[in-house]
Image: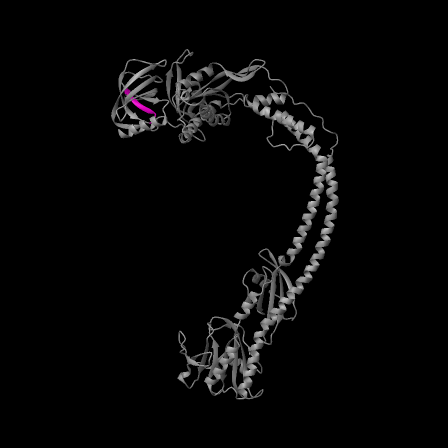
Amino acid sequence: MKFREPGRAEPRRRKIPFRVALIVVVVGLLTATASSLAAFAFVKQLQSIDVLRREYLEQVASAAVREVSRLPRLAETILVAHRSLVLTRVAPTDDSRALALGLAGVLEAAPELAWLSYGDERTGRFTGANRLAGGEIVLNLSDPRRNGGVPEELRFSARGGIEPFQRNPPVTEAYDPRAEHWYRKAAHAARIVWLPPYEFAEGETGITAAVAVREEPGARLRGVLTADFSLLGIDRFLRSVTVGAGGGVLLVTAGGEFLGGRPGAGRKAVARALRGRNWATPTTASVGTTVGGVKYHVVARPFSPGTGLDWAVVIYVPEAEFMGAVYANLRATVAITVAGLILAVAVGILVSAAIARSLGSAATDLDRIAKFTISDAPVRESIVKEIWLLQQAVGRVKASLRSFTRYAPEEIVREVVVSGREAMLSGEKREVSVLFCDLRGFTSFSEKTRPEDVIAILNDHFGALAPLVAEHGGFVVDFLGDSLFAVFGAPQACADHAARAVTCAVEMQVVRLAGDEANFARGWPPMEIGIGINTGVAIVGNMGSQRRIKYGVVGHAVNLAARIETFTVGGQVLVSESTRAALGTRLLADGPFRGEGKGVEAAIQMWDVRGLRGEVPLALPSPARDLVPLARPIPARVRLIHAKQIDAEVHPADLLRLGSSVAEVRSAVPLPVFGDAQVSFAWEDGTAAALDGKVMGASGPGGVMVRFGGLDWATRARLLALARSRA
């Protein structure tokens, strides 16, 4: 029966809580003040950082320009000086070896240079000195009139000595400097000419300066002097310059070719910034660009260090390198502002929420209790004593209601709480499915075990099975010793209660079988359950007295389910004919089997469940799953058990198959299905064995399946070992 929930008056206009109004005013004023101050400080910091950034990058650019310009100026100085020496005959051009030694001396004094050479216009002789990768200086001499013009090379020592030098592979082709591009270009120029950067024979990138040797402008050409220097030194210098953690310095040609500097994302930023821009103006220019989500400042200082080549020193630096301090200060300002706001909010909360929040929490809990939606969330204790006492009282009510649901169905408790009225004795007839589950052989085990161990094993057992009942919509009516009594279809009615009951039973057997592995590890005995199910009309409802009420299920359907359970063996599920009819073709079962039950007038027709069809098919593990066929029958004896009394008459029998807890027995006397019997035989060592069991059913002509009950781990292992030894 449903009851109307009492109405609750609502305020005509929406009211603002006191703590909300206080917090809004305080936070609003602080936010406006702090935001204005933070914005002013942020703008001023941006201006200061921009000035510092420009000055810093200007200094780095000036230092880089000075260093890059030094090498071209050095090469020009050496060429001009050496040209004077040639014109004044101080450097003898007609003595190639003496001239080469002089060039080598200059090369030794100027480690930045890679080559110094002289090509003679009249004779075509070439005289040069070059520095190898290891630092050695080699003289290179060629004369079209000697050795077919193939150059001769000599190693130069620091003390002025020379010795033959052989390259690998050796030089075999004639060489005439007058045919080279650099020679012709210098011969037609009135001043020093520079060739664009190119890769030397030694594998390094460098640049060549060449100057024509004439007595005076327009006079006859005597020859051409050259000076080569590698860009490797400039590259090392530029790589050594650090501009913050992620910045650097690059040397770039007017065509966008990188001559030196660090590789990486910075080069992409520079390439993007230089694209389509004219850097010919000899001033510093700055532009911003973004690469890979990182914003860079790119500053270029174009210069032409007297070479005729338009180069630019480019500095790149991530914006965060400069703006990091600004952003850090901004974050600090925001943090201080937020801290102030939090402090203001905390003060407002301490003043107003100490009462309002605690009362609101208690009111919410009481409202949930009225709807039986009990919250498990922890409650923050109030500092006000009276409110704390109220919270404690509400907590005790919640705990009591939770405990009550363990003694009565939750649906009944919810209906009583929501209705606000006392529960009354009442009942109704309803079709339900009743399930009885019993531990096999547990009584004898409990008599030999400490009480605390018995309780621990039972709690573990019921703790594994009871949640399965709830999961399938059933209700545990009672725990009867080592038995569980459950009903499906009450208190909550459902049309598929039979399917739910059988599904639950199959899963119980699977869980119990899996739980035996843990039992073995803990030293507990193997536990087997037999389950009986019946579907029929029963009386369900509140039963008892005015002082104590219990939700119960009574009727013939309950008694019949209890009787069916007594016919089961461990690992077996038996259902009544009415349950089988309710499931129809979904049920996979063997039978029918008939048995006489106490208090039941007619024979009970039962079915042995094997599985259940459905969207997710279920299969019940067979109690006889580990049977081993024997090569020769084992002689045995059988004694029937009636009303727990063993018959004195002994009947000869044979064991045809044997497992850890089941045997196929062929006996001279008929063994009735569901009948109890004692089977005696000899172990491997000749000692006698006498095991009590129940007949599960016929297995063939003259044979029946007997399931032994109450076996410990050692006996199970011994049976299996005997079966395998006789297989």
For the record, the magenta segment spans 660-666
**Which colour scheme appears in the figure?**
one colour
Residue 631 in the image: x percent, y percent? 25, 28
* Relative height, residue 334 to residue 360 (above, below): below
Corner quadrant of residue 246: bottom right
Q: Quadrant of the N terminus?
A: top right
Which secondary structure is most common in the magenta stretch? strand
Residue 402 in the image: x percent, y percent? 57, 25
* Relative height, residue 49 to residue 189 (above, below): above
The stretch drawn in magenta includes residue 661: yes
Residue 521 in the image: x percent, y percent? 40, 31
506 sits left or right of 44 in the view: left
Corner quadrant of residue 188: bottom right
Looking at this view, is 578 or 566 the one in front?
Answer: 566
Looking at this view, is 599 or 575 the one in front?
Answer: 599
Whether residue 134 is visible:
yes
